[in-house]
Each structure stands twice: as C-alpha cells, then as structure tokens.
Image: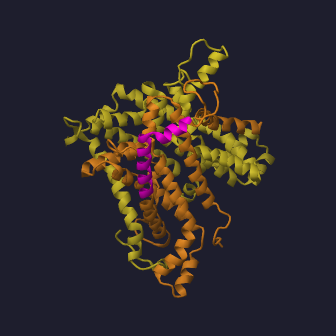
Amino acid sequence: MRRAYLLGVLAFLYIPVLVLVAYSFNDSRFALAWEGFTLDWYLGVFRDPQIGRALRNTLVVSSLSTVISVVLGTALAIGFHFGRFRGKALLDGGVYLPILVPDVIQGVGLLSFFALVGFPLGLGSIILAHVSFQISFVALLVRARLDAFPRSLVEAARDLGAGPLQALAKIVLPLAAPGIVAGALMAFTLSVDDFLIAYFTAGPGASTLPIRIYSMIRRGVTPEVNALATLLLVFSLATISASVLLTRSPEEGVKAR
Amino acid sequence: MTGAGRGTGRSGVLGGGGFVAWTVGPAAVALVFLFLLPLAILAGYAVLTTGEQGEPILPFTLVSLTRALDPLYLGILARSLRLSLETTAICLLLGLPLAWILRGMRGRARSLALLAVILPSWTNLLVKNYAWIVLLRQEGVVNSLLVRLGLVSEPLPLLFNEGAVLAGLVHTFLPFMVLPLYASFEKLDPALLEAARDLGAGGWERFRRVIVPLSAPGIGAGVTLVFVPALGAVVTPDLLGGARGMMIGNLIQNQMLLTQDWPFGSALAVALTIASLVVIILALGPGRRGERVELL
C-alpha cells in the first residue's frame, strides 16, 4: 500500500520527463511509435549555430555571475557569522527574500531599474540580474557550513598569534570550502536554468540557452527540442548531484564539537 | 553600514571596525541596488501616469492600481488565486502521506526515495513543462493512446486549459512541499505519538491534534514554497494554458513587454509582491533561520 503510493507519486514526477527523453532517441520525426534508436537529433542540436551561440552566451553569463556571487556571498556569510552590527536582524531576513520572491517580479523590477539608469540590456545586465539572486543561495550554503564548526577554532588561532587575515586564510576559508564549492555549483546551475529573469533583462539579441529553448518550444514539438531538453536535464542533474555530494560528504573536515 | 564593527568586543575575532564593512558591505550594496531598488522603482511606477509610449510620467495617480480591479483583469487575478490555491491543496494532499511514508522508511531505501523526490526539483522548468506538451497536445502521447485503445474517436483538447496548467504546476512544485513536511515529520518524537495512542486517540485524532500542530513550521514552509511561486508563475500558464490559462504573471509580462504600459505592469507587480510577502511573513515569520536552511 505504502510502496504503491510512493511508486505512484514517483511515476507522476518521472514519467512525463522520461517519455520526452525516450523520444529524443526515437528514429522518427513524427511517429509516436518507437521506430528505432538514433542520435541524429543530438547531432542536429550540436550543428545548430543558434544553439551554439546561445550556449556560449549561457556559459559566459553563468560563469561570470557565479564568480561574482561566490565572492560577494562568501564574504557576506563570513561577515555575518563573525561580525556584529546594527541592522543585522533586518539583513538576516532580507537576504532570503530574493530566494522567495517570484522571478517575474525580480525580472520586471530589474528591467525597470536598468531602463531607468540607462544600463544597456545584454549579457552584462543578465549577469547582474543573476548575481542578485545567486548571492542569497551562496550566503545560505556558506553560513550553514560556518555554523557547523565551532567559533573557538578561530579564537584559538588568534590567541596563538595569527593575524585576522591569516586566520581567515588558514582557518575560515578552508573550513568553509565545501560550502563555498556547493554554493558555486548551485549558483551556476540556477543561472544556467534561469529563463524568466534572463528573458526580461536580455534585450534583443542576447539569447541564452533557456531563452532559445523557450522560443523553440513555442514553435512546436520537435525531436531536436527533445534532445536539447534531455541535454539540459543531464547537465542540471550532474551539477546538483556534485553539489549534494559536497555538502553531505562523510569526511566533514572538522566535526562540530 | 553605519555602526560597522561597533561593540565588537569578543566578536571581533577577525579584525576591527573595517571587517563588517568589507565583508557584508559589497553584498549589501548589491542587494540594495539589484533587489530592493528595483522593487522600489516598481512601487513608484505603479502610482505614476501612463505616457504616450507607455512610459511612466507625472502626475501621481491611482489609475493603474484601480485598473487591476477592472472585470477584464479581475478574471485573470481570480484564476491566478484559484490555480495557486488548487496547486497548494493538491500538493499538500499528495505530500502529507508521501512525507509520512518517507519518515517510516529506513536506511538506504529512505535515502534513495528522498533523492528520487528531490531530483525533479532540480529539473529545468522549461523541460518539465515541455514534457507535458509532449504528453497532452492534440497529436500527443495521451491522445494517441486514447484513440488507439478506442476510448475516444477524436483527440481530446487536453492542452491549453486550466487543467493542463494545474498538472504542470503540481508536477513542478510537489517536491517543494514534500521536503519541508518530511523535515518536520522526522523531528516528531515517536513517544508523543505513542502517548496519544495510549490515551485513546484514533488515527485521525493523532494526525489532527498531535502531528499537525507539531509539524506546523514544516507545513507553513511547504505551503509558502508552493503557493508563492505558483501565484507568480509565468512559464507554465504560458506554455500549457495559452489564452485560457493566463495568470497574473503573464499579464505583467504582457504589460511590460508587449503593451508597454509600465505603470499598469508595475501596479500588477506590486500587488503580486505584496501578496507574496504577506504569505511569506505569515508562514515563515522572522527568526526561524534553522528551518529556512532546511528548505534547500
């Protein structure tokens, strides 16, 4: 009974996507029946110059925004963990809002902001837009990691004569490293996956991979879209598995207490 | 960051007054300029007049805000609310038993089942919605099966209606309901459930009077994580609902990008922001950081 329920819900979650993956290997453009195995649709995806351009744009946006947000988010988490300042409680709540507020609001808000200050829409504006929500995720993961080891380690280092920068470089950053890497992977995945915020802040011409996929979907179901969707699926699952493995690795560096 | 480094005392283990300014400062500036300021701009535009090209101009007016209550748009607002409430209710009904089953599992089976529930939440939204188009369209998988089995003579119009949007939303958000529910259930003390049973409480009564009150934070988190993004959905109603499944997010998108009536688009965005913030604050509240970390 319990097993049947569990399998039923998992079937609902997985079957639609698995059907799509299966069709991406089906050797027929129109038939719904299985006509044999092919990789033609994947070759078509790799040969499409527009997809290639969109992929390059996505890689530029995602890697640059990830680097920026990892630096800012990690610094924020460290300052938050060790510092005491006015407005901390307010910032504590506020920093989570970009995770929760719907994308469409952030998208139109950023579009209005860029238009108002005269910032040209393109890859640069998408990068800034992505940084605005990536910071929160990075800070969240790094803080969770910092919370897991005792503060006394840093105090001990300082008592033993380490300067603040030395303590930061030799104690804090190494201990926070798994959280930083997990945050980077999550920020990168979120950026690669984002359609809506990029759609609002891209302007004409700067198409990312999800924007390209969206316009292909709107034009109809084709085996090439099936293949492209499958590739995106594999990518997301690979990076997020890496992130999960890093945050839950058994060798936890220094165990709390 | 006024007051940075003040009253540090023992907290200044990593340096003096400049520490907070250098660590928290840059990210705080980024969040103010790229998150708060855009929201403030929308709030400002919402009370400005629409110019010739749809640009916001003076004087201040409430025209855009009241225009949202026009019957033309009220139907779309009502549908948004209905669809996100239905999505939340279905996710809760499906998710409660699922999370309870996960709680009862042990060892490797539980880890695998949890992973199986988490993985779809990291599948790209476009991919998930596209999968439903493949299934539900006129020449889609479901229709061709139905026709081949002789259950229907003509393909059914399964796509481009509220039902398709609902299927897509539940499919997208179910994992976000299950995970916080599971996190709460896992912390339940089995002794309390046993005590309730010993005192004569039946299954329903144990659920209603012990499990639900003790899991309230998880239920609140799950409801927020499903209701808020469902209310703000754009892609799913666009791809699966078409004109008959339009939600407030699509209306905002149209006003900002097609019609280019920025004050009206901003007014709708402000309404959506307020609705989202009210739900977030009611359900998550301040000072529950521990739970928020678990949401990921």
The image shows a total of numbered marks equal to: 0
Quarter holding residue A84: bottom left
Q: Most extreme residue toward the right, as rendered?
A: B198
Identity of the residue drawn at 36% across and 43% down: A200
A49 part of magenta stretch = yes
Q: Give residue A257's position: percent from left, percent from top.
A: 66, 73
Q: Give residue A91's position: percent from left, percent from top.
A: 43, 61
Colour orange maps to chain: A
Identity of the residue drawn at 49% across and 39% down: A45
Q: Give residue B75's position: percent from left, percent from top.
A: 41, 27
A94, A142: nearer the viewer: A142
Colour applied to chain B: yellow
* Figure check: B200 above or below A165: above
A47, A247: nearer the viewer: A47
Q: Give residue B232's position: percent from left, percent from top.
A: 44, 39
B189, A84: nearer the viewer: A84
Identity of the residue drawn at 27% across and 43% down: B45
Q: Provide the major secondary structure of the magenta segment.
A: helix
A8 part of magenta stretch = no
Is residue B105 visible to the viewer in this orientation of the structure? Answer: yes
Quarter holding residue A197: top left
Identity of the residue drawn at 57% across and 71% down: A175
Q: In this picture, which residue range is highlighted in magenta?
A: A40-65
Q: Most extreme residue toward the top, as rendered?
A: B153
